[in-house]
Amino acid sequence: MSNRGVGDAGPLPKPGDTADGRIPDGLRPRLRWLRSSRLVRQNLVLFAGGLVAGVGGFVYHAIAGRVLGPSLYGDVASIIALYAVFTTPTLILVLVLARYSATLTASGTTDSVRYLVVRSTQLITIPSVLIIIAGFLLANPTADFLHLHSPLPVIWLGIAIAVFWQVGIPRGILQGIQHFSALSANLSLEMVVRCTALAILLAAGTAVVGATIAVLAGVAFAYLIGLYALRHQLRAGGGRAPLRSMVAFSVAATAGTFGILLLYNLDVILAKHYLSSHDAGIYASLNKIGTILYFLTLSVSQVLFPRVVEALASNNHPGRLLGVSAGIMGLLGAGALLVFGVLPGLVVRLLFGAAFMDAQNYIFLVGLIGLALSLNNLLVQFCMAAHDFWFIPLLAAAVLMLAVSIADYHAGVGAVVTDVLATMLALLATMTIRLLFLLPRLHPVEPL
């Protein structure tokens, strides 16, 4: 039984593609190809949701920054950075379930969805309870290390992490079966609920605690609507899925996901530790502005991953998928960089307000960091889907380079920005070299 998802982009006829899957020559044929390309359609659907989610993420930080000011906003930013690091199991679960579901899709059978949901929930429940307990036990030490004004946000953070670990189950399956419309809605509505809850809670005077509870509200809503999107598959039943076959891939997924998360969160945590409260708040705002490009283009990697798995399962070449995806990412990133370079002061005022104007001199540089991070993530996702795990030592070396650089050179905001940019570019160069060796060994042509 096949469950692509109602109204979604499954294996549809592709009238604009050429017979051999190549992009046609000439302007008009290329425009027709773009309109009919399944890859482009899927990117547009998920880009819309990712754009809303990305904007929502920055609205969240903008509201928190404007209401709380640099010092208390530094608390919120470090809490969110810590939250992002501990959501690694969710993103790993998404990749594992997406890969398995995509393989089922390529074989024409997706009747094990219900078993995947039930069994995954059982496996995640005990760790979820443990992280809640850890939030209570480690609240005071964590608050001391991050110089937080109160340990209470850490307790709420543990609960939010536990719920978000469950969110990965419906999201991974939706990505794998290429039900991108439901996945798009899930990503965007989480942030809509988060920002709405934040505005209400801050107006009630709950400060940093309220900002953390708003995160919990968003992920709880995302979990419920994720299960609703899979209601037809859950009712259908189906056979058991051999989950042990996914264990080996989970190791690579762990390395890739955790490495990328550290690359855009470890700097915020270390900046909060080494810099003054004001400078830590300024750097946190820069980090969020820089990751605009990452979240703006994240949908490209999310579409690429199951498509590459599907291509390899069908004995097709995924290289052209990577080329077109990188091109889409580059075009999106170039537009954001243009705005950052021409109007840095306006970007800071719109997102964080006049209290953060010290950040404007670094806006273009953090834009470059965001684009480099996006491209690194794209290459990591491709390597994982293609079963090439050389990215693991390269990514580990980059994380180590980032930590050592900031620990050794943190004279101010500009120094940390320089450390991060150098790390991102070094990783991009080494990952590109690795891909040049990998691509010729893969099988020929995947129609887009």
Image (spheres, grey):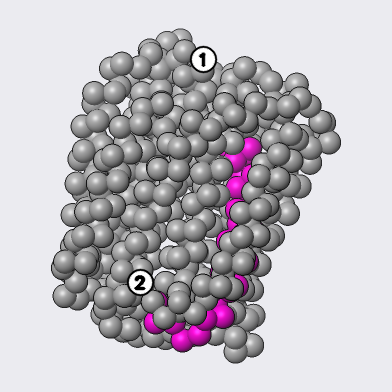
Task: Please say if 235 is above or below 186.
Answer: above
Q: Name the main secondary structure of what is drawn in magenta.
A: helix
- Mark 1 surroundings within 10 Å by alpha-carbon count, few (fewer than 14), some (14 through 19), many (20 or more): some
Res. 330 visible in picture: no
Front residue of 82 and 129: 129
SS of the residue at dot 1? loop
Residue type indicated by callout 1: Ser
- The percent position of residue 181, horizontal first and vertical second, equals 63, 42
- Residue beneath the point at 28% across and 17% down: 440
Front position in the image: 149 or 136: 136
**The magenta segment:** 146-175
- In reply to whether residue 166 is colored magenta, the answer given is yes
Is residue 153 in the magenta section? yes
For the point 41% across and 26% down, the residue is: 387
- The residue to which callout 2 is attached is 284
Q: Amino acid at mark 2?
A: Ala
Q: Give the residue at mark 1.
A: 314
